[in-house]
């Protein structure tokens, strides 16, 4: 009750101060201009980095306003599973965050703020869906992982009749069987999946396409079929001893552990591999009773895909990391396993940009272990489509990456099944994009599009002091209490969440100097902390819509004073000092809109 | 060989950095030499640090060179200035106070810092570290209030410190983990000897255990272990070994594996950058293994070798004479801590 | 070590960094906790715009009168300017700088790269802490005060007290500023370990009644206490502050301040007031003093009391408006046409500025002539803590009034033994008189005969003699008694440096003595001669090129004067004189 009161007093009252006329003035404008898309792309780096193009400043600001339900919805419109992603997203946005740019400090904890929205949305929070009328078309989705769920959701919205075929017992794919419960509690997953199923999606779980039902049969009975079957085939090490007892592939190990099977790990576990699965295997081993777990990686910690926070959690659980080693072979010696390694040195880079490791001759050494888990990647299990589809040299399905269409009419591919292992957020985005493509195919026209929305922003919403708030650390369980599948990350509480939300620069705000009103006093330049305001000769628009300033310090050449929004941290100092109030602030957002016939 | 008036920048004001500076100056009279250190104090002898607690001497008594030495040798000291970034492509460093420094050749000799196990990172503010002169000064002021101290983890710095603490009449508890006593990785036999040796000196030893939690208890602390022990203590020292102090290399593209990876000429993976001392990881063919060396002698040798290579003398690194740690009269080989004895 | 005696602190920034405001609070605080302080700020010559400003102060446990050459603690609010100050920092000095500034700078554009190996560098994120607490960067000066308080053990409460008093009701954001101070204090307490030796714990001395003031304020206070009722002047650096103080203060005592159109008008006002029997004063600097010269002669001739303060600055002409010098002595002694006896007073300290300004009124009125007070920019602007002695009552009125029987036939210029003729003030019955700049007879009637001119000139010079005998105290001798190897004679603010220097060399056991001369004309020749006879060598340090005072002495005494002259644009420091003394002793 107390919290509700603060919400009302702080936020609603401030709205009431607006006169009716002022409220009417809140005019909105939509644009299709490529300049504006280019501005969004350059200026809201987090959103651009997000495969699903989540409106990150938008939801962080609503978090700050304590409008958690709204924040959750802003997320859900585009990324479907905010509660899930708020925990396990790979966070490409945080790498791009302007707050993390050199000299500005650490990136905003974007992911954790997503969880804040999910955790604190009001009870019985209302889901908003904008459903099209029934189309009479039927679509089958093969696989209920993130890509399948994303596709099913959007297809259902478009009014199609969707059926999901899931080979395993329960829906969720890797979310349920790959990711351990201590990172993603299953009740959260269940609720968010059921929100999709509630749109009229049929789920056939425990039905393996190819075995229980032929793909050809699906193609016959449905107007379209989308394959989102993920990557369920673990890569092999190709070494001696790989098939010994107590030598597991990471995928099998995790699937068994996640389905509650009793898996032997022993007291000392050697994990091989540097991905998230390897980390999950190591942490799960610790929970299954191992005393010492060493993760062996080919290169060094700098060159593995796992982010620093995760690596830190792994080490917190007293897992050790051994860099620059290659596994050579595994032998059984008595009760335990003898694992031979070579030391590596770092080599050059592969074509894909991965750092290479080169084993050093004669540097062999042996370590013993009770079990060995290798988690060195996984790929699609494609046996069931071989009869229908063409494969490329790398044994991957050939399909058009923009229309998601295969050579077979009505058969589409999305998510990891097409691209190989990627991230949850990429898969969701891929599933949704495929749904739009399928709708274009079924309806024979584009029914949804992205536009840029402008809204005048009357007041500066941030304080300069907020730029100096440090990143709020995620509270976690003490190591002692990390047993079984208790969730490790506790989530930011409301106070911490609000502090963290304050840190966001709100890059979707565009600060612009209205040239006719500007008197060239340059006060704004004096107070600008980042040198982003320039005396400018010209602004050139490139072919891709990006704008480039031609800066000059010769006074007779200056035609305008321009704010370079790409270096701007939206501190508002300029607006505060401008004597003629010629600096306007506009909120710019990328939104989805219906296309009228 | 004609020597260009290079600008040599050295990060670190310890044994490696100073020995390199000295060699560089001898090899090139005209070069510009700059030492940058995040510490406010001058180059000093770490082995005297524990004894520094015992008397009321001035901090300058620890210094190895008078400051005039740097004037005479035309070596510029930038103390209390932290390097936050290295940009090898531009031959630039960025300091914490937003100053860009250019170098022709760079030596990273930033040494090591106490290892904070990630599982204890949330208790960082409750743990005391003891590696530099500033920390020694701070500790000396608090000494009077201490009766009992706990060493979280086992390392040689902790031993030094324990020696001083015993002399000051404080009681000491060690919490040792199962796998090593830095810089030794030990087997059961060594471990037993070590424990025996410590106990003889009336040091309480909690072996095969890990500190999991530290909580404030009045003015003191409660140190709790995985096996459920609770140690009531006044001060908990972080003595779990040392790790290279190279956070500022993040994003520089320089290859790192715990320490900075260098080739046999002490050269890093980045052009014109060398590394020496405790921050460097060297692959020693003799050992078939990578190693970060510790201790004064190694640092001096590596600093010297790096400097010679920076002067283009092509000097190959070799394993310094191994030292030994003596425990209960028995010697154990170690690369570093020459002639160090656990029999305090 | 030197810091045991005194510590010199500089706060250096660009104008707009408010380094002087910080200096003011710091010096007040140091004074409050028992230190002797002396400050001397430097700021750009331009009236507006950017430039270096330096709050410079010396604080010590012992009494002192001058600045040191070396700085011990340099606080940088602007690295570009502070780097220039580094050359005067002592080898083991302290530098405080902003280690988290807003912009990235090129190598060596930051002070941190320029320190000697023995110096101590403390970095404090001034900009960030200022932004954090006050939402603007301009409070860096306050944050740094917090840091200084923690770093050098200066009691915090005094600081906050002075901070709030200074901001007073003027500023609503006092709380934010105090928060900025606390933030600086907290940052240092939590993050910095002190390695340098400087420390200012509270001294157990009673500073009750002590006031912080600069020479200008002391002059103004002296004028008020001496009963000055009219001040007329035209603003000029460095004398303007005298007028500023009097603007607010003088009306409270029934006085009037007039800002005139120029300096000629100003002294005209004062002359008129003098005629009317009102104590009046004007203050100016070199260029303005030149304009007043004609009136010096006029007041000598018409035997009218005026008090003129000349705060000397670098010359000639407009010269160096913000730099100190002692080069107006010739002008003060000789300026004007004809034989023009006048009294010239040169106080050596802020306290003497007060005493001798009051004395000047007394002398001017008593001897009916112009009295010139020569101070200099350094004395004018340097702030010190002083305890003022109250002025004896008899000094407040010294007009020699004619007896009633003399009024039947009033002789304005009556010949008397001491040359002083009783003066009837306007309104006194039968007190008619002719006042002009023409030579006159006893009635005041203009005449040009030999007899009258000779008689009147002698009479005017007799007043000087009378003043010398009755009212000029003998110059103060200090140092070794009896015969000495070296004597120092000094004047004005340089005498302060000489006194400090003497303290030091005496501690070294040198045989030296010093004579401090305050009244430059008339000179106490007998005492000075005695002193000269005691000294093997005599050193005269002064801040001008020719040695104007040494020349003046040479006109009176047969002795070789060793001159130590500088036109350094800054005061001569005690260490410089110390070195010169040692050099002469060795020679």
Image (cartoon, coloured by chain):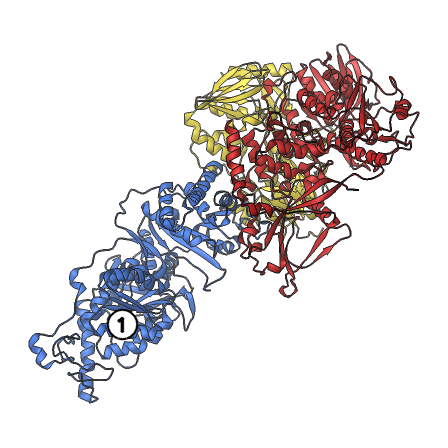
Label 1 crowd bin: few (<14), some (14–19), many (20+), radius 10 Å: many
Write down the colour of chain A.
Answer: red
| Quarter of the figure with residue A522 | bottom right
Q: Position of residue C160 (x, y in %)?
A: 38, 44
Query: In the picture, which chain is yellow?
Result: B
Q: Position of residue A381 (x, y in %)?
A: 85, 23
What residue would you read off at disc 1? C270
- The reply to whether residue A286 is visible in this rendering is yes
**Furthest-right residue in view?**
A387
Q: Position of residue B117 (x, y in %)?
A: 60, 25
Q: Nearer the viewer, residue B280 or A527?
A: A527
Answer above or below: position of A161 versus A581.
Answer: above
Relative side of C325 to A391, left or right: left
Relative side of C466 to C326, left or right: left
Answer above or below: position of B320 versus C73.
Answer: above
Query: In the picture, which chain is blue?
Result: C
Q: Position of residue C154 (x, y in %)?
A: 38, 42
Quadrant into which the C terminus of chain A falls: top right
């Amino acid at each position: 009750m107390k919290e509700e009161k603060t919400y009302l007093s702080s936020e609603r009252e401030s709205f009431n101060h607006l006169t009716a006329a002022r409220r009417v003035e809140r005019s909105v404008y939509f644009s299709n201009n490529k300049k504006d898309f280019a501005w969004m792309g350059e200026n809201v780096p987090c959103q651009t980095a997000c495969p699903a193009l989540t409106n990150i400043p938008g939801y962080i600001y609503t978090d700050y306003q304590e409008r958690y339900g709204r924040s959750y919805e802003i997320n859900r419109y585009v990324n479907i599973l905010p509660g899930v992603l708020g925990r396990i997203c790979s966070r490409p946005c945080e790498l791009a965050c302007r707050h993390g740019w050199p000299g500005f400090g650490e990136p905003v904890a974007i992911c954790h703020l997503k969880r804040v929205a999910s955790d604190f949305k009001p009870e019985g929070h209302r889901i908003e869906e904008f459903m099209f009328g029934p189309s009479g078309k039927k679509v089958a989705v093969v696989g209920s992982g993130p890509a399948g769920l994303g596709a099913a959701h959007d297809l259902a919205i478009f009014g199609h009749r969707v059926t999901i075929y899931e080979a395993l017992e329960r829906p969720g794919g890797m979310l349920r069987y790959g990711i351990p419960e201590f990172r993603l509690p299953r009740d959260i997953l269940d609720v968010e999946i059921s929100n999709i199923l509630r749109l009229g999606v049929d789920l056939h779980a425990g039905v393996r396409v190819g075995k229980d039902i032929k793909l050809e049969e699906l193609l016959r009975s449905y107007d379209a079929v989308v394959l989102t079957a993920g990557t369920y085939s673990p890569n092999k090490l190709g070494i001696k001893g790989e098939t010994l007892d107590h030598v597991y592939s990471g995928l099998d190990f995790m699937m068994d552990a996640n389905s509650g099977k009793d898996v032997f790990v022993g007291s000392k576990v050697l994990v091989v591999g540097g991905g998230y699965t390897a980390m999950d295997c190591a942490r799960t081993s610790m929970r299954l009773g191992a005393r010492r777990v060493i993760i062996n990686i080919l290169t060094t910690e700098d060159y593995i895909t796992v982010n620093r926070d995760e690596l830190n959690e792994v080490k917190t659980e007293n897992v050790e990391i051994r860099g620059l080693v290659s596994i050579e072979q595994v032998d059984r010696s008595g009760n335990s396993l003898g694992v031979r390694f070579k030391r590596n040195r770092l080599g050059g880079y592969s074509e894909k940009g991965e750092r290479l490791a080169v084993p050093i001759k004669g540097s062999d050494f042996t370590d013993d272990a009770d079990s060995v888990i290798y988690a060195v990647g996984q790929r699609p299990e494609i046996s069931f489509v071989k009869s229908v589809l063409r494969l490329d040299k790398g044994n991957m399905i050939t399909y058009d990456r923009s229309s998601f269409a295969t050579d077979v009419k009505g058969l589409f591919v999305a998510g990891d099944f097409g691209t190989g292992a990627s991230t949850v957020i990429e898969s969701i985005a891929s599933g949704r994009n495929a749904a739009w493509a399928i709708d274009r195919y079924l309806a024979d026209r584009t029914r949804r599009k992205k536009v840029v929305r402008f809204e005048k922003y009357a007041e500066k919403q941030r304080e300069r002091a907020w730029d100096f708030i440090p990143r709020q650390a995620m509270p976690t369980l003490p190591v002692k209490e990390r047993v079984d599948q208790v969730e490790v990350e506790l989530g930011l509480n409301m106070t911490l969440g609000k502090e963290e939300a304050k840190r966001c620069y709100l890059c979707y705000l565009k600060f612009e100097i209205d040239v006719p009103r500007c008197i060239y006093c340059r006060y704004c330049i004096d107070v600008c902390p980042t040198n982003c305001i320039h005396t400018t000769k010209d602004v050139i628009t490139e072919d891709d819509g990006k704008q480039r300033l031609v800066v000059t310090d010769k006074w007779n050449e200056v035609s305008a004073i321009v704010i370079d929004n790409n270096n701007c941290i939206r501190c508002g100092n300029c607006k505060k000092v401008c004597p003629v109030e010629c600096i306007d602030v506009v909120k710019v957002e990328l939104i989805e809109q219906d296309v009228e016939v | 060989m004609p020597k260009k008036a290079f600008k040599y920048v050295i990060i670190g004001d310890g044994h490696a950095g100073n020995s390199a500076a000295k060699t560089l100056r001898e090899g090139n009279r005209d070069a510009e030499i700059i030492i940058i250190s995040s510490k406010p104090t001058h180059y000093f002898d770490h082995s005297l640090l524990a004894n520094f607690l015992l008397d009321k001497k001035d901090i300058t008594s620890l210094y190895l060179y008078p400051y005039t030495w740097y004037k005479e040798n035309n070596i510029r000291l930038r103390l209390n200035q932290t390097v936050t970034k290295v940009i090898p492509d531009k031959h630039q460093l960025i300091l914490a106070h937003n100053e860009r420094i250019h170098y022709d050749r760079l030596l990273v000799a930033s040494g090591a810092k106490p290892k904070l196990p990630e599982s204890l990172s949330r208790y960082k503010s409750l743990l005391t570290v003891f590696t530099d002169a500033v920390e020694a000064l701070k500790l000396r002021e608090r000494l009077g209030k201490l009766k009992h101290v706990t060493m979280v983890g086992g390392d040689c710095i902790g031993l030094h410190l324990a020696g001083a603490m015993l002399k000051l009449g404080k009681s000491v508890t060690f919490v040792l983990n199962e796998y090593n006593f830095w810089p030794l990785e030990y087997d059961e036999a060594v471990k037993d000897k070590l424990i025996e040796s410590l106990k003889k000196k009336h040091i309480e030893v909690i072996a095969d255990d890990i500190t999991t939690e530290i909580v404030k208890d009045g003015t003191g602390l409660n140190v709790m272990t995985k096996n459920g022990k609770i140690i009531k203590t006044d001060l908990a020292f972080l003595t779990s070994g040392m790790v290279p102090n190279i956070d500022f290399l993040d994003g520089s593209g320089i290859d790192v594996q715990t320490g900075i990876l260098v080739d046999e000429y002490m050269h890093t993976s980045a052009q014109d950058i060398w590394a020496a001392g405790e921050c460097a990881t060297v692959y020693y063919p003799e050992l078939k293994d990578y190693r970060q060396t510790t201790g004064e002698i190694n640092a001096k040798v590596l600093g010297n070798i790096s400097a010679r290579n920076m002067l283009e003398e092509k000097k190959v690194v070799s394993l310094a004479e191994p030292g030994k740690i003596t425990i209960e009269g028995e010697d154990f080989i170690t690369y570093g801590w020459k002639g160090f004895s656990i029999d305090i | 070590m030197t810091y045991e005696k005194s510590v010199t602190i500089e706060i250096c920034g660009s104008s707009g960094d408010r380094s002087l405001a910080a200096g003011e609070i710091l010096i007040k605080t140091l004074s409050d906790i028992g230190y002797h302080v002396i400050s001397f700020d430097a700021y750009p010559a331009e009236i507006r715009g950017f430039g270096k400003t330096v709050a410079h102060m010396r604080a010590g446990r012992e009494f002192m009168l001058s600045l040191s050459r070396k700085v011990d603690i340099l606080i940088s609010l602007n690295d570009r300017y502070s780097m220039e100050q580094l050359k005067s920092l002592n080898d083991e000095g302290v530098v405080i700088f902003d280690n988290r500034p807003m912009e990235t700078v090129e190598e060596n554009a930051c002070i941190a790269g320029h320190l000697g190996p023995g110096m101590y560098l403390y970095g404090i994120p001034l900009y960030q802490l200022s932004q954090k607490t006050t939402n603007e960067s301009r409070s860096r000066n306050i944050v740094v005060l917090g840091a200084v308080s923690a770093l050098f053990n200066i009691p915090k409460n005094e600081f906050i007290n002075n901070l709030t008093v200074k901001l007073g009701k003027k500023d609503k954001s006092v709380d934010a500023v105090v928060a900025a101070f606390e933030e600086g204090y907290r940052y240092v307490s939590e993050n910095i370990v002190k390695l340098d030796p400087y420390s200012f714990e509270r001294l157990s001395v009673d500073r009750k009644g002590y006031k912080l003031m600069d020479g200008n304020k002391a002059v103004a206070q002296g004028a008020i206490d001496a009963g000055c009722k009219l001040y007329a002047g035209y603003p000029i650096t460095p004398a303007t502050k005298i007028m500023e103080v009097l603007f607010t203060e003088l009306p409270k005592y029934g006085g009037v301040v007039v800002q005139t159109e120029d300096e000629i008008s100003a002294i005209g006002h004062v002359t008129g007031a003098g005629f009317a029997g009102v104590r009046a004063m004007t203050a100016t600097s070199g260029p303005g003093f030149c304009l007043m010269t004609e009136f010096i002669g006029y007041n000598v001739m018409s035997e009218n009391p005026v008090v003129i303060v000349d705060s000397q600055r670098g010359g000639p002409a407009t010269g160096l408006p913000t730099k100190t010098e002692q080069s107006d002595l010739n002008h003060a002694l000789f300026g004007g046409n004809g034989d023009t006896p006048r009294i010239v007073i040169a106080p050596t300290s802020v306290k003497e500025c007060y005493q001798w300004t009051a004395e000047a009124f007394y002398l001017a009125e008593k001897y009916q002539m112009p009295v010139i007070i020569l101070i200099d920019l350094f004395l004018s602007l340097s702030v010190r803590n002083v305890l003022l002695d109250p002025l004896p009552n008899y000094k407040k009125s010294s007009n020699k009034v004619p007896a009633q029987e003399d009024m039947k036939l009033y002789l304005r210029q009556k010949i008397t033994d001491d040359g002083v003729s009783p003066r009837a003030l306007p309104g006194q019955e039968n007190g008619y008189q002719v006042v002009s700049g023409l030579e006159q007879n006893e009635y005041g009637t203009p005449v040009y005969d030999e007899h009258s001119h000779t008689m009147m000139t002698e009479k005017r010079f007799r007043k000087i003699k009378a003043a010398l005998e009755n009212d000029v105290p003998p110059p103060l001798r200090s140092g070794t008694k009896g015969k000495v190897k070296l004597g120092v004679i000094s004047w004005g603010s340089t005498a302060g440096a000489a006194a400090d220097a003497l303290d030091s060399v005496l501690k070294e056991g040198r045989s030296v003595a010093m004579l401090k001369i305050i009244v430059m004309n008339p000179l106490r020749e007998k005492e000075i001669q005695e002193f000269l006879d005691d000294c093997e060598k005599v050193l005269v340090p002064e801040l001008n090129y020719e040695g104007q005072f040494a020349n003046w002495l040479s006109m009176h005494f047969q002795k070789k004067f060793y001159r130590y002259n500088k036109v350094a644009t800054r005061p001569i420091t005690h260490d410089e004189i110390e070195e010169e003394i040692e050099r002469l002793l060795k020679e």
